[in-house]
Image (cartoon, coloured by chain):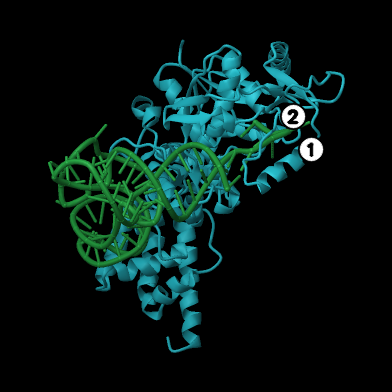
Amino acid sequence: MPIKTRFAPSPTGYLHVGGARTALFSWLHARKHGGHFVLRIEDTDLERSTAESINAILEGMTWLGLEYDEGPFYQTDRLDRYNEVIDSLLEQGLAYRCNCTRERLDALREKQMQQKLKPRYDGHCRGAGVSGDEAHVIRFRNPLDGQVIVDDCVRGKVVFNNNELDDLIIRRTDGTPTYNLSVIVDDLDMEITYVIRGDDHLNNTPRQINILTALGKSPPHYAHVPMILGDDGSRLSKRHGAVSVIEYRNQGILPEALLNYLVRLGWSHGDQEIFTLDELVELFDINDVNRSASSFNNEKLLWLNQHYIKNDTPERIARLLSPHMGDLGIDPATGPDLVEVVTAQQERASTLVQMAQISAFFYRDFESFDEKAARKHLKAVALEPLGLVRERLSELADWQPEPLHELVKSVAGDLELKLGKVAQPLRVAVVGRAASPGIDVTLYLVGREACLRRIDMALQYIRLRGQGDDQ
RNA sequence: GCUCCCUUCGUCUAGUGGUUAGGACACUGGCCUCUCACGCCGGUAACAGGGGUUCGAGUCCCCUAGGGAGCGCCA
């Protein structure tokens, strides 16, 4: 049978980075073996499933580039099929009707907890012969003894005793199937050979295997991958910051950076840190995934992101950066070529949002000089070099980085100053801050008109400031 | 409480009985330098604890502790 994996999120929120990682592992496993990757939406919980959530998941998968070969399938389209399986289990006596009230179940659970027992159904209706005419659920008749061995690709063999399990509900009073039933029917019908999922499902697996066995089928291969924790060691959630992959996109993270980061959480290949998707398809092996949970570390993600920003073509980065400029109210068409701006900033930003922020000054005047930078560089001693630079800039014939570089150097030389004594005041005057790309490229991209205007602002700022105190 | 899982630098990890316990992020010292960044060179920092097995244990076994997950008419 050809290798087939699936990603089966329930549409009750956004595509979580933990989900994205299991999706990535499933996708890689399928790609590596020339198999298929299936997307299935587990929306049998009608109360909590939403269309927005489905869209968010599809959007996230598309952004990450985890394309699926089959689906998306929706479980709500397959209710008849689940009922067919449930009915056949019922007919064969492998399942039974139960009319226990929620009150009874709640009381039972409470009593068991008090007795320090594991809460579970007591089999009250197992032999009761509850009629189909009254309100009821269907329970699977779980074996009472023996054991189930889950042979897991990442955990190894895990043994569960049947006497720890109970008769789980497979059809609700309203007639809809529950998770443990629909999952195994889908995986069976869709011919899934590898179930790769979060290890929060490990405890469900013996129940699913028992149903499969009752149906006369053999289980697929399983791989339960460890969960992702927040930086405080608890389960990753909203309070740790971004958890939705779309949030990462909005923060200016590149999809390849997020994928590279996620794959290294629980998996490695020697000392290698950077992987192309092609390399991953070749090198990744689900059997090599770690057993222990790992903490999400945003700094390392930022480092990877900067790496990818640095090493991609300026053209692609510019295309991705453009909407983030828009977020700042800047239309890149109104100023210097965004590709040239990216080339100048590529090594200076770890996210696209940050790159937009540090590039805004190319497109519009800043509100005010950064105070610390101004205090250090916009002083009376800067009046002469700034004045001279201004004069020569206004006369410069060829407004290009090279001549601009020569110009700044010549001013420094003529005034017998170190280059920094000219470049830094000039930078603060033109940029508003003490940090920017090389002064020549900065002047070139800002353009003559804005440069002269901003230098005049700086000269005036120094003079006004000088009147006030001991400057 | 019960069942299952996990435990190497702060974090991600390498390590499959003999290593000065390696790499990466972060932190940090230096170099480069017109600033920031990049890059380069260096540094701090780990086998949870206790018992075994063995000539020898991060590696194998047991116990303890700590952490996580599950125990729903959620998935």
Q: Considering depth in this image, is A362 or A108 the residue closer to the camera?
A: A108
Q: Which chain is green?
A: B
Residue A238 to residue A38: above or below: below
Q: What subunit carries mark 1? A: A
Dot 2, crowdedness within 10 Å: few (<14), some or many (≥20)? few
Q: Give the label on residue A373, or none.
A: none
* Upstream in sequence: badge 2 or badge 1: 1
Q: Are marks 2 and 1 in contact (CB under 8 Å)?
A: yes
Answer yes or no: is residue A95 visible.
Answer: yes
Secondary structure, mark 1, is helix
Residue A323 visible (yes or no): no
The residue where tag 1 is placed is A104
Q: Is residue B72 left or right of residue A306?
A: right
Residue for point 48% across, 73% down? A371
The residue nearer to you, when weighing A115 against A193, is A115
What residue did someone put label 2 on?
A124
Q: What chain is colored cyan?
A: A
Mark 2 vs mark 1, foreground winner is 2
Rendering coords of residue A459 (x, y %): 46, 74
Task: Name the residue at 40% across, 39% down.
Answer: A266
Q: Is residue A95 left or right of residue A375?
A: right
Work out how far the residue at label 2 is from the one at label 1, CA to CA, in angstroms.
Answer: 10 Å
> Label 1 is placed on what type of residue?
Arg
Report helix, strand or loop for mark 2: loop
Amino acid at circle 2: His
